[in-house]
Amino acid sequence: MSIAVIDKTFSILEVLARTGRPLTLAEVAEESRLPKPTAYRILKSVRDLGYVDQAARGGAYELSARLAALREYGRDEAVRAKARPLMQRLHAAFDETVNLGFLEGVYVRYADVLETTQPLRWIVKPGARDAFHTTALGRAIVAHLPEEQQARLVAKACAALPARGRRQARAALEKELAATRSRGYALEEEETVVGVACVAVPLIALGEPLAAVSVSVPVHRFPPAQRTALIAAMREGRDHPAATA
């Protein structure tokens, strides 16, 4: 016997796929024969997971690129293939650990890792997850999302923080995301792991706005000259991610 909410969710996704165009909430409810409140709750959930896009508050809904990627070879494999040229270039140039991550709700999931050959290293295994706001990967992705979507994720991330200081934490996160968007890359130093810094860029140029690549470096191997070189390479990779070495 099917679970009712799953049945309703797939009914909505099938409506969006069948019509092939953005639909208003009223149209989705009518086509799926569901009450508008039910359709709204389901659309909000799948939108927050990244499987449905909504242009603006109250705007029409459509299937996202993330859902389309599931149709072709599986999302991880498809994005890994796109990101590998950039990851391999960065690994060859710096011999530091290179990570590929996806935004999933308020978390970043690590989908691929190229490990450094150097003895001192910090390796995150594929499948591990971190809260997006604690990582360069997550900040690089969320900083470039539409304003409304970014605000929802920030609110959800901060809701889990202690009430005391929550407002200040939210203001600091919003400031960091604005700075990340302005400079085009995210920087995180010893916030997730003591002794490790990360630089990350989103893969928007590859058509993957919910994915990013980062390089993790022990802070003792991150002097100013190395920092400048890595940031320059990440900026170049952001703009030309599919280039070959």
Image (cartoon, grey):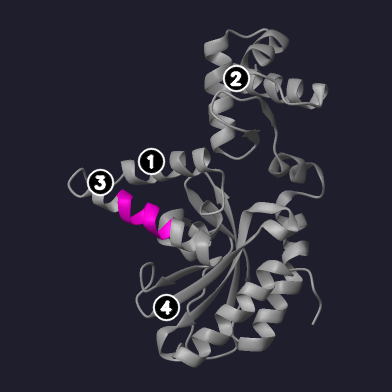
| Residue at x 52%, y 59% (from the top left corner) | 181
Which of the two labelled residues, at mark 2 and mark 4, occupies the earlier sequence position? 2
Looking at the image, residue 85 lies above or below residue 56: below
Counting residues from the start of the chain, the first of labels 1 and 4 encountered is 1
Left or right of residue 126, residue 240 in this image: right
With 237 as the anchor, is 162 left or right in this view?
left
**Mark 1 lies on residue:** 155
Q: Are marks 1 and 2 in contact (CB under 8 Å)?
A: no
Q: Are the residues tagged 2 and 4 within 8 Å (C-beta)?
A: no
Helix, strand or loop at mark 3: helix
Mark 3 or mark 1, which is nearer the start of the sequence? 1
Q: Quadrant of the N terminus?
A: top right
Q: Is residue 42 visible?
A: yes
Spatial CA distance of label 2 from label 4 is: 44 Å
User: Given the image, on which type of amino acid does mark 4 rest?
Assistant: Val
223 left or right, relative to 126: left
Is residue 114 visible in this depiction of the protein? no
Residue that badge 3 annotates:
167
Q: Is residue 47 above or below residue 2?
A: below
Amino acid type at mark 2: Ile
Foreground mark, 4 or 3?
A: 3
Q: Position of residue 218 (x, y in %)?
A: 44, 84
The residue positioned 52% from the left and 67% from the top of the image is 183
Distance between mark 1 and mark 2 Cα atoms: 30 Å
Residue range (magenta) = 170-177
In the rendered image, which quarter is residue 240 located in?
bottom right
Point out the tag, 1 or 2, that comes first from the N-terminus: 2
Residue 3: assigned label: 2
